[in-house]
Image (cartoon, rainbow, N blue to C red):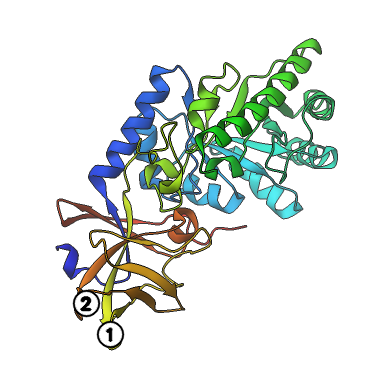
Amino acid sequence: MVLAEIDTPALVVDLDALETNIKRMAAWCADHGIALRPHAKTHKSADIAALQMAQGAVGVCCQKVSEAQALIDAGVDDVMITNQIVRPAMIERLLTLCARARLQVCVDDADNVDALAEAARRHGQELAVLVEINVGANRCGVAPGPPALALARQISACRHLRFAGLQAYHGPAQHLRSYADRQHAIDKAIAATRATIELLAQAGIACPVVAGAGTGSFAFEATSGVYNELQCGSYIFMDADYAQIRNPDDAPLDTFAHSLFILTTVMSCAQPGQAVCDAGLKAQSTDSGLPRVIGLSDVRYTGASDEHGVLSDPCSQLALGDTLRLIPGHCDPTVNMHDWYVGVRGGRVETLWPVTARGRIA
């Protein structure tokens, strides 16, 4: 099947670009002597996770227990949940998964530590726990320094918990357009993390894992001498938002290629200078901006409703039934809207992969 024969809207992956991105990040980490644990919330795919681990990734990250469970059910055996799990039912599910895979979880609250310890005791499991510190995202995470040390001490004192290290991820920094702004934000995160590690060492507490970093900042964390595990996710796909961040010379970040697209069909050309395609809000997320049209410099995606995408076409290049490729504004939530990846190589469909953890948000 060729591209034009695929029912639209469809989530299409350029397999050559995807594989190149996976190999490039794996090689970069190997060259710098740092572990790679890619974030599977980006792709939610056991097939893509297997490709990443085959290239040397130590495991994957997930955000939710149900997401981790779907990937573990599909054969992924090493998962870090980079989030706080607090509901009793979810803690039970978490401990059940510990018997089937190497599992780690994050905390930022003493009561949560106690709840995890009690559940681990009842299940007869040892649970690896990282303390998440707030290094600038101002989302989850205890303050660096003494508050983090207090949690690490509490974890270390629990018979069925094991202090595994620090989670120090600065999410918003990934999307700062300026290289200098990203570096400044991550330098502050590195300083806070280093100070916390030193405090732990003074208390005699080893910190095996120092995890964080994303596609927009990984070079800073990896060369800091502080972080030893990277959690980049979007590098495999590279959405339209990431295309806007810059290198030191103000050129676009081009380390990785765009590999994820929404394939869409022109369904109306009734208005002069405008066309309408079948990829609207139910086919993609626009929280980080509208998608980019590939291959037609004068055609722009200008607006979306539930089932329609409006295209500015001032030169009337488009005709009814034409297919277009769109680079989504934000890859992660776009993926969660689809059941399948259509893997394409050389313009032809080579494979179909299920979005294994689609809808797993609990």
Q: Report which residue position mark 1 lands on.
A: 272
**Quadrant including the N terminus:** bottom left
Q: Position of residue 60 (x, y in %)?
A: 49, 38
Q: Nearer the viewer, residue 100 or 79?
A: 79
Q: Report which residue position mark 2 lands on.
A: 316
Q: Residue at x 29, y 67 (%)?
A: 299
Q: Nearer the viewer, residue 108 or 212?
A: 212
Q: Nearer the viewer, residue 313 or 283?
A: 313
Q: Residue at x 66, y 25 (%)?
A: 164
Q: Residue at x 44, y 58 (%)?
A: 329
Q: Amino acid at mark 1?
A: Pro
In the rendered image, which quarter is residue 310 located in? bottom left
Distance in Å between CA atoms under marks 2 and 1: 8 Å
Residue 170 as seen in the image, left or right of residue 74 = right
Precedes in sequence: disc 2 or disc 1:
1
Q: For the residue carrying disc 2, how many other residues have a C-alpha within 10 Å: few (<14), some (14-19), or many (20+)? A: some
In the rendered image, which quarter is residue 107 located in? top right
Which element carries disc 1, helix, strand or loop? loop
Q: Which mark is residue 187?
A: none
Q: For the residue carrying disc 1, how many other residues have a C-alpha within 10 Å: few (<14), some (14-19), or many (20+)? A: few
